[in-house]
Image: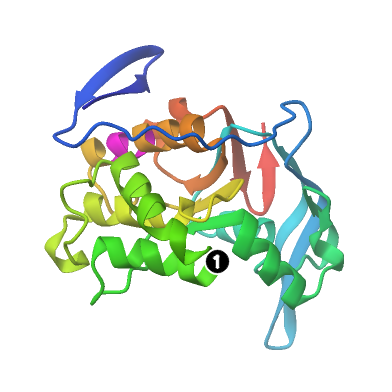
């Protein structure tokens, strides 16, 4: 399979020794000019000892359908804190976060959990795979947790693993896979329940530059095929040209 990626304003190819992308009949109703998520004047503070640390300081942003958005910044700039708020894993100290029609800043833990289970997928730097389960079983587990009917599991797992180029490695356990392959399993797991938003925390940080470029190519294919929006954190300047929009964070604020 040959995949495309952006580099210095041009399109180049990388050859992947994997299976071709599976076709999908899935379609999602999308209004391109309507934000999928809005963040308005968001602040997040934490009590540490007898003092307060302000981690986010008035964040304003939008995520639109079918975009690849990157949060760029050094460690400690607030990227992961913001990603947790966008995903409903935490609540802002002040401000509003609206995902689709859901006001996360007013939602209970249970309500946010139900929304995440149906509409949001997560990809972590450490892959977060079950070590004793095969790639197939890890993706299947995501469908179980999302409450997907059992009759749909086989077709959906096969499609997701083919989509990330692991059609020939789907019965291997994580320790039998390379770092790049483990990240591909994590991606397949994140998209299995057909979310509308994928959140990825430093998904290329543990990979070399070639593997990182391949993961970005996989993201582009997923946006087109699965009709999702991807928001990811990074401090890797080599992949920024793949983004539709980049928000740079310094000390809890966006800079231009």
Q: Nearer the viewer, residue 165 or 218?
A: 165
**Residue at x-position 76% and y-position 36%:** 35
The residue carrying pointer 1 sits among few (fewer than 14), some (14 to 19) or many (20 or more) residues within 10 Å by Cα, namely some
Per the image, the residue denoted by label 1 is 146
| Left or right: 15 in relation to 137 | left
Q: How many marks?
A: 1
Rendered view: 172 above or below 244: below
Rendered view: 29 above or below 51: above
| Residue 153 is inside the magenta segment | no
**Residue at x-position 16% and y-position 62%:** 172
In the rendering, at what x and y percent does residue 131 appear? 25, 74
Q: Is residue 52 visible?
A: yes
User: Which residue ends up furthest to the front in the rendered image?
Assistant: 151
In the rendering, at what x and y percent does residue 175 appear? 16, 67
Q: How is the image coloured?
A: rainbow
**Residue at x-position 54% and y-position 50%:** 194
Quarter of the image that includes the C terminus: top right
Span colored in magenta: 212-216
Q: Nearer the viewer, residue 22 or 110?
A: 22
Rendered view: 105 above or below 201: below
């Amino acid at each position: 399979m040959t995949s495309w990626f952006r580099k210095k304003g041009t399109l180049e190819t990388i050859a992947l020794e994997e299976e071709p992308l599976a076709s999908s009949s899935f379609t999602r109703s999308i209004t391109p000019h309507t934000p999928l998520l809005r963040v308005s004047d968001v602040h997040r503070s934490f009590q540490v000892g007898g003092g307060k640390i302000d981690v986010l300081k008035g964040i304003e942003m939008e995520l639109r359908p079918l975009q690849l958005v990157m949060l760029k910044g050094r460690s400690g700039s607030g990227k992961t804190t913001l990603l947790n708020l966008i995903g409903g894993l935490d609540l802002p100290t002040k401000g509003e976060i609206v995902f689709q029609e859901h006001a996360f800043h007013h939602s209970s833990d249970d309500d946010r959990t139900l929304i995440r289970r149906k509409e949001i997928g997560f990809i972590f730097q450490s892959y977060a795979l079950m070590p004793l389960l095969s790639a197939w079983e890890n993706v299947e587990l995501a469908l179980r947790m999302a409450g997907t009917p059992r009759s749909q599991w086989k077709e959906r797992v096969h499609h997701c693993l083919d989509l990330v180029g692991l059609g020939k490695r789907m019965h291997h356990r994580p320790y039998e896979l390379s770092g790049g392959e483990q990240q591909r399993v994590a991606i397949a797991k994140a998209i299995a329940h057909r979310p509308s938003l994928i959140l990825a925390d430093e998904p290329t940080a543990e990979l070399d530059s070639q593997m990182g470029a391949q993961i970005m190519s996989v993201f582009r294919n997923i946006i087109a095929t699965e009709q999702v929006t991807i928001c990811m954190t990074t401090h890797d300047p080599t992949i920024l040209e793949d983004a539709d929009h980049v928000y740079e964070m310094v000390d809890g604020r966006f800079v231009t």
